[in-house]
Amino acid sequence: MSDIKWSSIGPVAERFGIEVPRLRTWCDKGLIEFDKRTTGRWIPHTEFPKIEKIIEVFKHGGNVTFDDVKEELIKENLYHQSQTDEEQKEKENEMALLLGQAFEQSGANEMFMQIGNEFQRMQQEVNRLSQLVEKQNETRLLEDSKLNKLQEDNEVLKGIVKDLISSDKDLKDTFNVFMKEQKKEKKGLLSKIFR
C-alpha cells in the first residue's frame, strides 16, 4: 500500500457513476481487489481500469454473469500482459545493442558477453516463472467460478430434496389418517354385528 493511492468505496462508486452496493458486490465476487479497514472498504486506484472494463461488459446487455465478466477480465489482462512483454523485449534488445557497442569499444567484450548471456538466461527464467504465476491465477479464477456454480446447483438440489421429503411426509400422514378411519369403520361395523 506504500506507493499505491487508495480511495474509499463511496467516492470510487461516485466517480464511476455506480451504486455502492453494486461495487461492494463486485468486490465480494472477487472481480475487484480491495482492502477492508475499520471504516469500510478501500479500493486501490490500480483497479480503476478493471472497474471501467466491468462497467463496459455489463453495458453490452444481455444475460451477463459474473463468470462472463471474469473471463473478459482475464482476456483483457492477457492483452495488457502481451503488450507489456513486447515493450519489454524491445527495451531489452535496445539495451543489449548499446551495451554491445560500448563493450566492443572498451575491449571487455568477451567478459561482458558471458555476463550478458547469464543475465538473459536469468531474465528468461524470471519471465517463465511470471507466466506460471499468471496461469495459476487464471486457473484459480476459473476454478472459483466453477466452484460457485456447483455450490449454487447444490443449494437448488437441497431445496428439491426438502420439497420431496415434505411431500413424502404429507403423503404418509394422509395414508395414516385414512388407515385410522378404516379401522374405526371396521370396529363400528363389527360392534353393530355382534350386539
Image: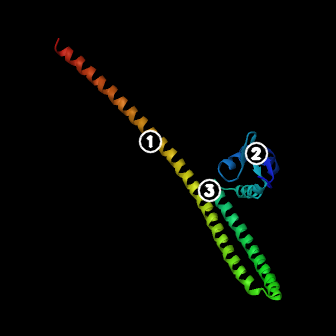
Q: Is residue 45 above or below residue 194?
A: below
Determine the residue positioned at 62% across, 56% down.
67
Under mark 1, the amino acid is Val
Of the two numbered discs 1 and 2 on the same chain, state the one appearing first in sequence. 2
Determine the residue positioned at 36% across, 29% down.
174
Of the two numbered discs 3 and 1 on the same chain, state the one appearing first in sequence. 3
Determine the residue positioned at 50% across, 47% down.
154
Q: Which residue is mark 1?
A: 161
Q: Secondary structure at mark 1?
A: helix
Q: Which residue is mark 2?
A: 19
Around disc 3, counting alpha carbons within 10 Å, would you say few (fewer than 14), some (14 to 19), or many (20 or more)? some
Under mark 3, the amino acid is Asp
Under mark 2, the amino acid is Glu
Residue 87 in percent (x, y) is at 76, 74
Q: Is residue 33 left or right of residue 98?
A: left
In the rendered image, the residue lying farthest to the left is 194
Residue 124 shows in this picture: yes
Q: Nearer the viewer, residue 37 or 79?
A: 37
Residue 65 shows in this picture: no
Query: How far apart are labels 1 and 2 at the CA level?
Result: 37 Å
Q: Quadrant of the C terminus?
A: top left
Of the two numbered discs 3 and 2 on the same chain, state the one appearing first in sequence. 2
Q: Which residue is mark 3?
A: 67
Which numbered marker is on residue 152? none
Name the quadrant containing residue 57. bottom right
Name the quadrant containing residue 175. top left
Q: Nearer the viewer, residue 85 or 153?
A: 85
Query: How far apart are labels 3 and 2 at the CA level?
Result: 21 Å
Do residues under tags 1 and 2 come within 8 Å of each other at their CB atoms?
no
Q: Secondary structure at mark 3?
A: helix
Residue 80 in percent (x, y) is at 73, 67
Q: Nearer the viewer, residue 34 or 20?
A: 34
